[in-house]
Amino acid sequence: MPVVPLTPDLRRRLVTAARKAVRMSYSPYSKFKVGAAILTDTGRIYSGCNVENASYGLCNCAERTAIFTAVAAGERRLRAVAVYTPTPVATMPCGACRQVISEFGPEAVVVSVCDGKERLETVIPALLPAAFGPHDLGVRETNPPQPRRRR
Ligand code: THU
């Protein structure tokens, strides 16, 4: 599968999708809104927001909402992630999200934008060095999505 180049246009679309996704943030407890968008190797963009819960430990980050939505749609490889927070400074994905991004995009680019001038851009190997991954479990090929059954 050819690698989708992260062109300036795709980067812009990804950031726009993250900014849009924040509108659906369900964050009545932290009041910290997050929007995320991911670009997969098929060139598609999926977005998500953080979804909190009265049982705090069940809160789901925006990045994972977007990634799980993509995986459920049959995607397996992640090329880039954009995070948007309506804050003066940009924030990077939390540790749990770095691990989940790494599962599907060990080389993924991570872009973070906010309402201030700050814009961060890095890659997963820098955010999660020496990551634990499928290779540690002896898994070389992760399971592909099953083709849709005809009805
Ligand atoms: N949050 C995210 O959505 N992404 C991150 O990478 C960090 C934190 C959310 C989780 C929770 O709803 C709120 O931000 C405060 O932690």
Image: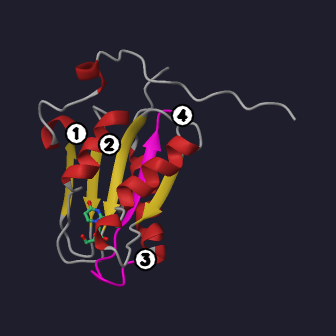
Q: What residue type is labelled 3?
A: Tyr
Tell me the number on the disc at residue 101. Answer: 2
**Chief secondary structure of the magenta span?**
loop
Q: How far apart are marks 4 and 2 (CA)?
A: 16 Å
Q: Which amino acid does label 1 sit on?
A: Ile
The verdict on residue 40 being magenta is yes
* Quarter of the image with the C terminus in it: top right
Where does label 4 land, which residue?
42
Please rate how many residues cluster around mark 4, counting C-alpha atoms within 10 Å: few if below 14, some from 14 to 19, many from 20: some
Secondary structure under tag 4 reads loop
Secondary structure under tag 3 reads loop
The magenta segment = 26-42
Please rate how many residues cluster around mark 3, counting C-alpha atoms within 10 Å: few if below 14, some from 14 to 19, many from 20: many
Where does label 3 land, which residue?
26
Secondary structure under tag 1 reads helix
Where is residue 121? Give x, y as percent. 21, 50
